Each structure stands twice: as structure tokens, then as C-alpha cells.
Image: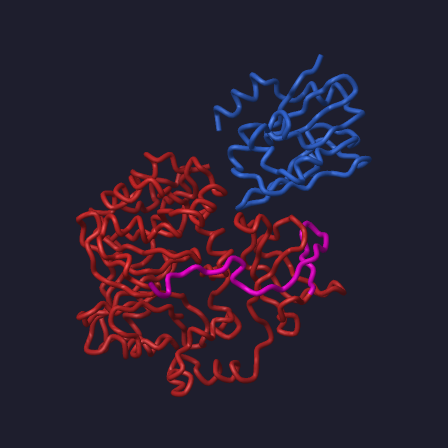
Chain colours: A red, B blue
Amino acid sequence: MADTSETLLKTPLHALHVELGAKMVPFAGYDMPVQYPAGVLKEHLHTREKAGLFDVSHMGQAFLSGADPAKALERLTPADVIGLKEGMQRYGLLLNDQGTIKDDFMFSKLAGEADMYLVVNAGTKEGDYAYIADKLEGAATVATRFDRALLALQGPMAGAVLERLSPGIDKLTFMKVVRATVAGCPAIVSRSGYTGEDGFEISIEGKDGERVARALLAESEVLPIGLGARDSLRLEAGLCLYGHDIDETVTPVEASLVWSIGKRRKMDRDFPAAEKIMDQVFNGVARKRVGILPIGKAPAREHTQVADKTGRVIGEITSGGFGPSLNAPVAMGYVETAFAADGTEIDLIVRGKPMPARIAPMPFVPHRYRRAI
Amino acid sequence: MSETRFTDQHEWVRVDGAEATVGITKFAAEQLGDVVFVELPEAGRKVGAGGEAAVVESVKAASEVYAPVSGEVTAANAALTDDPAKVNADPEGDGWFFKLKGVEEAEFGKLMTKAQYDEFVKGL
């Protein structure tokens, strides 16, 4: 097999991952740590118990500027961007003209700043920003900052840890965002993440990435966490992985992400394919994204077929594996709407054999966001 | 007198009298990472050399375990069902997968010795 590591991109933390003994794998064009010597199970459980540090510098950071960047961005997403208050972050879906999901992303309004700060997925960042720049030409300008580092500090002790490196930061509540100084480095810090736990995302200059990461890792509660545990943590938390659970074949309604459509946007119907999507909101869809809990111990992986009790295929798993915090297999996928109610008994076709499972509410592990002090 | 041989799919098979025990190698267990599920063959099932005999799953991925030699399954390691982590803790001991009878010496003799397997792994 040819060595492809030469052509892979490296985050500002690459040398640190290698030094920490990470197993590196190609992901979204980057050479990324899938696990460290502790292993996926311990990394996962440590994050839920204490605090884990993730390098997510491969994700696509950018600033959107213009006369009214929030208004411009609303042309491409059904989220309420204009209504977002200063100092807040929000989740949104980037839709194409057909109203299917081009990406999911986070957008922020920093206090006293006109530009919007965006973070999109790693594998889609080039395409997303070219699309946004093209669609918003004349109204807004995209300045990508793929040179910046992005760290996630996640877990119940994340607040106490970050407070030591950035006094006052623990006052921030869920989905708030500020400019702050972390370990002496200028940073954009939001209280958010992708694990279902309390935690922060910390954007810093690329040159400061290693310094801030080392300062966090020097705290006794913090372990480095790889992409393997990042995936099992987000799956237990019921959060979508772009390219697997959502993509350009599904609408926000099919993806069970209607909550991300702003109330004003639903009334004004001024987002891509709004009539089609609102028709789906009111009249339903043929299939929906649901949580699925296998009844046995065998994990059901992505692309596993879902069948009804007569053996008819009614859907497919889009993310599935083992949930270390539940000590049981967990999955999500799409099923015909008639089978989407919680508790519905279904079969998963694993290695040719039907394996009993149930539709189940997500998250599988309760979110523990810091909504109030 | 027991002797252990290895496959290029990273299974080991130890023959002790009329009985052969099969598992995955330490190298395979390390590559897989934390094992969270195993599916084992039923006693009485006949397996052919190189045929799928068991499944081992880590948090992230599922892998087949192939029978290193032909034979009839006499027992499976039920302890792995409750505690799959045994595969990581002691892959070439307590973490065995299944036992076979009726193994032919000629087939067994074609597999790699410990020294040959160690050399094979070094080259990967």
C-alpha cells in the first residue's frame, strides 16, 4: 500500500499527537489522531467523568463580513441568524436550493464585532465556503481561517480546568461565546461541543495551538482524546455526523432537525426550498432519522439494513457502534415514518441474521450542558 | 506437548493432543483496540481452513476471525461474551475464541511458526 501521509494535511498540533503516541489515520484530508495509548474506551469514559482535549483544527473556521452578514447568511440557512444575540453561538443547517443539507455548522456573533464567526465540517469546508461566497456575492465576503487551531475541552471538569488558564471563563453558559485569553494566548471561546457534555471550543492562532494544548494537558484532569472516542461520544449524545447521518439526500424534516429552523423563518418562508420544507413540517415525510437501540450486545454498523418484523426492509443505520457509557450498542438511522415512534420493535440485519432492536429517544446519554450558573 | 502456529490473518492455533484452541494474536488485539463484542461459533459446527468462524468487534469496527485449520467446533469461550475485554487483556491465553477437534496435522504444519509469524509482523 502506498504511503499517503506525505500528501495529508497536518493541524498545528500534529507533532504533539505523534509525541503523545497517537495512532494517526487519514480523515478529511488530514493526518489525525484516532486514539492515544489509553484507547477509545478509556478516552470516552474519561471525557464523561473528567475532561478530554480534542484537536478539531481540521474543521473549517471563517469570518463572514459585509453590510449585514447575518441577513445575508439567512439566504442559505433556515436558522434564525438575525435574531442571534451578541455573545451567542447557534447551530444551523446550510441548505442547497433543493432544501437538502449541504452541511451543518455553528455561527457566532462576538460582542461588538460586525463579522460573524463560522465553523463548518472539515470534509466540506472548501466546498461550503466557495458556495457561500458565490451565493452571497455582493452581500457578504468569506475570509477562511484554516490556519487557525481549534481545540475542544469537554467533560464535567472542563469548566474548573479552563478557569485556571482563563480566569472568569467558567461564568460563560451554554452557547455563549467571548474573546478571552487562554494560557496567555488570544482566543475565541464558546461553551459548546460535540460530546453532550459541558465544555468549550477554543479557537486560537495556529502558532499558539501547541502552547494552549500543552497547558491544558498539564492539568491533572485532562487526557488527549482521539477521533474514535469523539465519534462514540457524539453518537451517545444523538448528534449527527455530516456525510453519514445527514447529507444532500435529506431535508431538515427527514433529519429530525426541525428544531434548528427559526420560528420567524417558518413564518416568513424565506430560506431555500422553504415551501417544500414547510409542507414536510405540516404534512409529514416518508422517512425520518431516529435513535435505535439493539436489544442484544452486537453492534449494528453504518449501512446495516433495518427491517420490520415481517422481514421487509424499512430503513438503514447511518451511524452505529458500541456506546461505552451505556456499555451497550447504540445506533441512529432512517426508517419509514410509520415505524419511527419510540418503542417500535424492529430488526437489524447483522451478518444476514435479524437482530431485535427498538426505536429509542435520543440522546442515549443525557446532555449535561451548563445552561445556568 | 502443545505447539502453537499462526496465520497471516493474525489467528493462532494451539494443538494439544486431539484438541486445538484458536484465538487472535496479541498484534491483532492491539490493532483492533478495545474489544466490545464477540460472536462465537456453536459447538458441532464444521469449519474449513480460512473460513469465517467468529466475529470480533472493537468500539469502531467489526472483523472476521477465520478458522486457521479445518475441524469441528467442540467449545466456544463463553467468558468472552460477558467480558470481551479478555481478548485485549490476554489474547493468546484466557482470550481464546473456540476449540476444534479433528484437525489434520498436515494442515497445521503449513502454518507459520512463532518465529516466522514474528518476522511476518515485523514486515507489516
Residue at 60% over, 32% down: B9
Q: Is the N terminus of chain B in the top left, top right, bottom left or bottom right quadrant? A: top right
Residue A338 shows up from this direction: yes
- Which contiguous range is marked in magenta? A345-373
Q: Nearer the viewer, residue A271 or A166?
A: A166
Spot the residue most to the right.
Answer: B44
Q: Is residue A184 above or below residue A281?
A: above
Q: Nearer the viewer, residue A336 or B89?
A: B89
Residue at 35% over, 47% down: A53
Q: Position of residue A322 (x, y in %)?
A: 56, 49
Query: Is-magenta flag for residue B108?
Result: no
Q: Position of residue A154 (x, y in %)?
A: 37, 52
* Residue A117 as seen in the image, left or right of residue A349: left
Tell me which corner region of the image, top left, top right, bottom left or bottom right, holds residue B48. Answer: top right
Spot the residue most to the top.
Answer: B1
Q: Nearer the viewer, residue A165 or B9?
A: A165
Residue at 35% over, 43% down: A222
Q: Nearer the viewer, residue A206 or A180?
A: A180
Residue A57 shows up from this direction: no
* Residue A307 as seen in the image, left or right of residue A185: right
Q: Position of residue A228 (x, y in %)?
A: 46, 46
Q: Is residue B11 above or below residue A345?
A: above
Q: Position of residue A30 (x, y in %)?
A: 36, 47
Q: Is residue B1 above or below residue A165?
A: above
Query: Is-magenta flag for residue A371?
Result: yes
* Residue A73 as seen in the image, left or right of residue A296: left
